[in-house]
Structure formats: structure tokens, C-alpha cells
Amino acid sequence: MQIKEPVKILDVPVHPLTMGEAVSALEESITSGEQAFVVTANAEIIMMCQEDAGYKKIVSQDAQLVLPDGAGAVWAGRHLGYKVPERVAGFDLYCQLLDKAAQKGYKAFFFGGSTGIAEAAKAKSEELYPGVQVVGCRNGYFKEEESQAIIDEINASGADMLFAALGAPKQEKWLVRYREQLKPKILMGIGGSFDVFAGKMERAPKWMQDASLEWLFRLYKQPSRFMRMMALPKFVLKVVFNGKKA
Ligand code: UDP
């Protein structure tokens, strides 16, 4: 996979690609047969990397592509003096890849969410991207010893793209642990994206996304995320006071 050099945000590498470049790079992994594990790194993920060395290794060394997800990651990159063309949000990339899959006949597998959510997301995908082939669905609540059966189900489906919606860092840890056994060429963690497609969770209106206020909308909808969202101001402070261009 030929991609631009990563920039470093709090010692986490992030590839400053546009959405179009990210989709092309990932499509190339399907056509070349070279597997790509992609992480959409938002401020919360970058902060998790500061405290969890194992997760930092996954994002820094195991991922082929790390994209700037969210206003925080883009702001931090630019604040540190790098050129970061745009935000490549996980949810938007997931939509773009489904669109590409519908056009080119690539197959997708939906793994994650509570019972019935992946199936509901599949139905929504078929409505939004006519012709898209979602060749398997599996909920994300399982015991570790069931992983082999899940891998077998994914491989038997013939999927080219595996979307794992288990939340960060669980989804990335699972994908990296089993990536050598997994046959899909694109491995991507997408957090709560199936919940959005299934109508269980709303995405912020476009104006809020454009005003970099998606975090505020999520806090309003899910006040229980308050503690998790404290990562955002901590991230800003850390970038301002400790961040430096590598
Ligand atoms: N989830 C799952 N298995 C688990 C834990 C979580 O499938 O063991 C799902 C959960 O149902 C939800 C998603 O993972 O659909 C996590 O969503 P969240 O918004 O927390 O993820 P984020 O985008 O913030 O990483």
C-alpha cells in the first residue's frame, strides 16, 4: 500500500489522507490481495494509546493505515504544524466503502453490536447502497473461546471487507490478534456505526459536524459518556503543552 508518510500526534502516527485517498488505498488492498488493517484514530483513541502500551503498539505498528477521525485529531495535527487535509471519520469511511462495494461487487461482513443490530445495519446498507453484498452478520457479544467459530464464519462468507463494531480498543485488539487467520482484505473497527444504521443511535446533524461539535451532540444523547469524553479536554491540553512536531 503506497501512502503518505504519517504525521505524529502525541507519538501516534496518523496518515494525513483525504477521504478519497483513503478509499483508493483501501481498495488497492482488495485488488492486490494485501490485507490492510485500518484504524480511524479520534482524540479518545489517541489518548487511550497514551495509557495502554499494547494498544499504542497496535495503532503505531500493526495498522497499515491510521486516519484522522474527528475534529480533535485534525486540529491537533494542524496545531502541531502538519498539513492535515480533512477529517476522515470512521462512520463516513464505512459508508464510502459500502458505496464502493456496491459499485464494484466487493463483499462485506458485519461483526458487532447487540443482537439484531448488524442485521438491521445490513438492511439499511441495502437500502442506501443498492446492490451491496453484506454476506454475513454476527453480534459482538461472545466469549473468547467462540472467536475461532466467528473467524470461520467470516472466512466462509467470502467477505472482502470486515467491519468490526465492538468499540475501541476491543475491536482493534480482536482484529490484530486474529488478522493472520482472517481472509478479508480490509479489516476495520467502526465503533457504534451499526447502531447509527440500525437507528439505535443518531448521528449529529451536518451543521454540528461542520462546526466540530459532534462530541457535544454525543454527550447530549448519551450523558453516560461524560467520563469517557473527558479524554477530549485532556487531549487538547496535552497537545498544547506537550505536543511537538516530530
Ligand atoms: N459492542 C460489542 N461487543 C462488546 C462491546 C460493545 O459489540 O463486547 C458494541 C456495542 O453494542 C456498540 C459498539 O460496540 O454497538 C460500541 O459503540 P461505541 O459508541 O461505544 O464505540 P466507539 O465508536 O465510541 O468506539
Image (cartoon, rainbow, N blue to C red):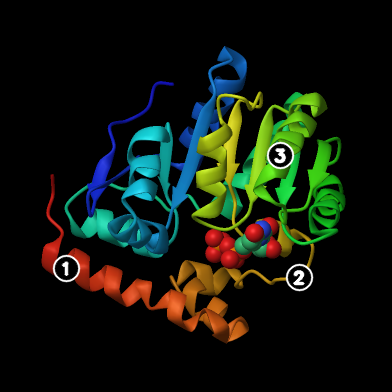
Q: Does the residue labelled 1 lie within 8 Å of ligand 1?
A: no
User: Where residue 57 sits in the image (x, y, percent)?
Assistant: 34, 42
Q: How far apart are marks 1 and 2 (CA)?
A: 36 Å
Q: What residue type is labelled 3?
A: Asp
The residue positioned 31% from the left and 48% from the top of the image is 84
User: Where residue 19 sits in the image (x, y, percent)?
Assistant: 49, 42
Q: Is mark 2 on a helix, strand or loop?
A: loop
Residue placed under numbered mark 1 in the picture = 240
- From the viewer's perspective, is 226 left or right of 13? right
The residue positioned 39% from the left and 21% from the top of the image is 2
The residue positioned 75% from the left and 32% from the top of the image is 154
Residue 163: which quarter of the image? top right
Q: Residues within 10 Å of mark 2 (few under 14, many from 20)?
A: few
Kindly tell me whether residue 96 is visible in this rendering.
yes
**Quadrant in which the N terminus appears:** top left
Pointer 1 with pointer 2, Cβ within 8 A:
no
Q: Does the residue labelled 2 lie within 8 Å of ligand 1?
A: yes
Residue placed under numbered mark 3 in the picture = 99
Q: Mark 2 or mark 1, which is nearer the start of the sequence?
A: 2
- From the viewer's perspective, is 244 left or right of 115? left
1 or 3: mark nearer the eye: 1
Q: How far apart are marks 3 and 2 (CA)?
A: 22 Å
Q: Mark 2 or mark 3, which is nearer the start of the sequence?
A: 3
User: Where residue 104 sits in the image (x, y, percent)?
Assistant: 74, 25
Q: Quadrant of ligand 1?
A: bottom right
Q: Which mark is residue 200?
A: 2
Q: Which mark is residue 88?
A: none
Q: Does 20 sit above or below residue 120?
A: above
